[in-house]
Image: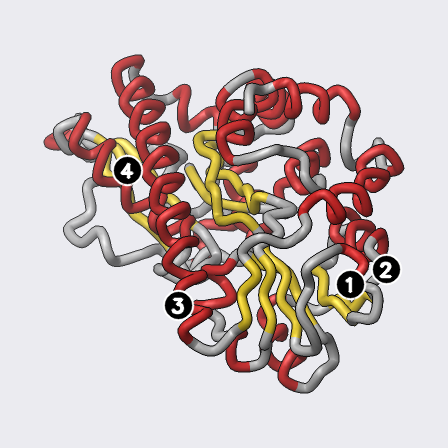
Amino acid sequence: MKTTNQNIAPTRRSVLLGTAAAAVIPATKAFSAVKTLRYAHSAPTSHGWHLWGVQFKQAVEKRTDGRIQVTIFPNAQMGTERDIAQAVRLGSLEMGAVGVALMNWVPEMSVTDAPFLFTNRKQAYGALDGALGAELRRRSLAQGFIISGWTDLGMRCMTNSKHPIHKAQDMGDLKMRVPPSKSYIAMMKAMGSTIVTVDLSELYLALSQRVADGQDTPPSVVKSNKYYEVQKFLSKTEHVMTNAYTIMNPKAFDGLTKDEQAAVTASADEATLWLRDYTQKDELSAYEFLASKGMTVDMSPDIPSFQAATAEVITSLPDLFHPDLVKLARSASA
């Protein structure tokens, strides 16, 4: 059924219980050409997941002359990342954007969190668009997910409130916040830091109360979450590219015609490329903004020292960082 107002969303409960419309919703007989795809994520509308969704919506609706309509549900309207991934897997939601939640079903996705896995973005994009991406897509499909897009959410930097971080050895006396992730815990410990596990939603308070001295997120997050108010020093280490995924239910995709499938695939690729360009520009702007707010910004830290300190993290955690996947990642052209 073609809705009269695309901004009116079904409840989270109806979607997760599968009582909302079917995976790809045909319209009534009078509008039989119209199908609806619902795309959900847990982030605010300023986040890369939402921006990807807006670009995808515009592109696919244009390519299909409106025969496919996309409704976007931001701000955790459909639940947490895990809720969204589960709903997509079950087919009670067609599309979503997730990060570490996908690793509950496809643990191999954690390879992209390996420290200094890529030399630069060119290599990262080449790997995700090439052999590494193909293998991760294959493994995801086996668990009930189509990877429809790769979302570059930014290269991570180090911040803290105590002193400059120019080399890895400067991390030794810092209490660094990490997400509840084995890879990030191992990485910070390898640099000698004390670990504090704090949810992102509580990070500003933890930094302001000195529960943690520092943290690592992309500079755009430092800007948007106003960590510059409670952090003095920033280093552009780019130790991990924060990569996440947009996912689609396979049956929903199979329910489209061949032309519609081609339109969805092309539109997803277009949205991915658009977000990559946006994220890189946004990063540069964020570094300038943070410097203007009084942060001491080191744009050229001693990267080799960080690479050397964290090198064994990848080899010591083969269950997280599968050697064959690491090899695929690093075989892409830099």
Q: Residue at x 57, y 43 (%)?
A: 241
State the residue position of label 3: 289
- CA distance for labels 2 and 1: 6 Å
What residue occupies the far bottom of the structure in this picture? 209
State the residue position of label 2: 192
User: Dots 4 and 2: beta carbons under 8 Å?
Assistant: no
- CA distance for labels 3 and 2: 30 Å
User: Looking at the image, can residue 239 be seen?
Assistant: yes
State the residue position of label 4: 36
- CA distance for labels 4 and 1: 50 Å
- Examine the image and state in which quarter residue 143 appears: top right
Q: Sequence-wise, which precedes: disc 1 or disc 3?
A: 1
Image check: 302 left or right of 130? right
- Examine the image and state in which quarter residue 202 appears: bottom right
User: Dots 4 and 3: beta carbons under 8 Å?
Assistant: no
Image check: 111 left or right of 23? right
Which of labels 4 and 3 is toward the front? 3
User: Dots 2 and 1: beta carbons under 8 Å?
Assistant: yes
- CA distance for labels 4 and 2: 51 Å
Q: Residue at x 78, y 37 (%)?
A: 320
Image check: 186 left or right of 210? right
Q: Residue at x 69, y 63 (%)?
A: 165
Give, as a three-letter code, the residue at label 2. Gly
State the residue position of label 1: 171
